[in-house]
Amino acid sequence: MRLETEEAMSLVEHLTELRKRVIRVVIVLVLGMVIGLIAAKPMIKYITSMPPANSIDLLNVFSPWDSIKLYMNCALITGLIITLPVALYQLWAFMKPGLRAEEQKASLMFVPFAFALFLVGLAFGYFVVFRMAFMFATSITESLNLKETYGISQYFSFMFNILIPLSLLFELPIVVMFLTKLRLMNPARLRKMRRYAYMILVIVATMITPPDAASAIIVFLPMIVLYEFSVFLSGVVYRKQLEQDAAWEREGSA
């Protein structure tokens, strides 16, 4: 009876801790969205002054809500970018009590690397994939002798629909390292899953790029590099775990 009470109290404490950390993340998200609303106007002007937007004669609004929707989308994206490192840190802090001292230090390093990879994915998505997709669509429009009249809300939605999935895909090495650290994943399992992973990456690459082979290959190749880099990192973490386990066994038998 006492054991059940202790387990119930432990569960309540964990849920209370989780709620506190979720509330902190939500607060940071709201503050980030406020910053996003303030920064939305210069951000929109900057993006529309860069290619490919500056090559378009007009960026129109087709509804009174388009401008408001654009502001809110920019605020949300900005809020998510600002919140990401905080959310990762809160996740680490929540799991910290269940990790060894050396695992705590090693896993904390995942936070800045995860954020850096997200920004790299954002840059790759904008400067390579989005521009490539947009220019492909523009070439089709020109081949049909149609006039380009784009709505600014649709332009930004098209851009965000490409950037966000790619940025999240660039988190793959960190996710794999983290799962390996928790002993839920290992390099042997990743190698066994390679053919299925490649197939999924091909599907993703074809979904977020124009429907031509060259574009899909340009996006698919970095994804393959990311996956293989994830396997390599998983192997590094896994070997260190085996070395630590062997050291503990030697200490235990001494």
Image: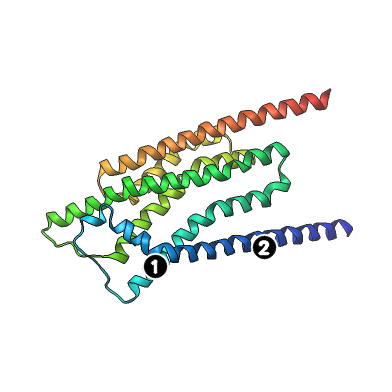
Question: Which scheme is used to colour this image of the protein?
Answer: rainbow
Residue 157 appears left or right of 98: left
Q: Which residue is mark 1?
A: 71
Vertical comparison of 220 with 25: above or below: above
Q: Nearer the viewer, mark 2 or mark 1?
A: 1
Instruction: Determine crowd level at label 2: few under 14, some 14-19, many 20+ residues with C-alpha closer than 10 A.
Output: few
Instruction: Determine crowd level at label 1: few under 14, some 14-19, many 20+ residues with C-alpha closer than 10 A.
Output: many
Q: Do the residues bearing badges 2 and 1 touch, measured as CB atoms within 8 Å?
A: no
User: Identity of the amino acid at label 2?
Assistant: Arg
- Taking the image as drawn, is residue 192 in sight? no
Q: Residue furthest bottom?
A: 64
Q: Residue at x 57, y 39 (%)?
A: 177
Element carrying mark 2: helix
Q: Residue at x 42, y 52 (%)?
A: 165
**Residue 206 in picture, x, y percent from top left:** 33, 47
- The quadrant of the rendering that contains the C terminus is top right
Camera-side residue: 75 or 168?
75
Q: For the residues marked 2 and 1, what is the alpha-carbon distance in whole angstroms?
A: 30 Å
Q: Quadrant of residue 77?
A: bottom left
Q: Which residue is mark 2?
A: 19
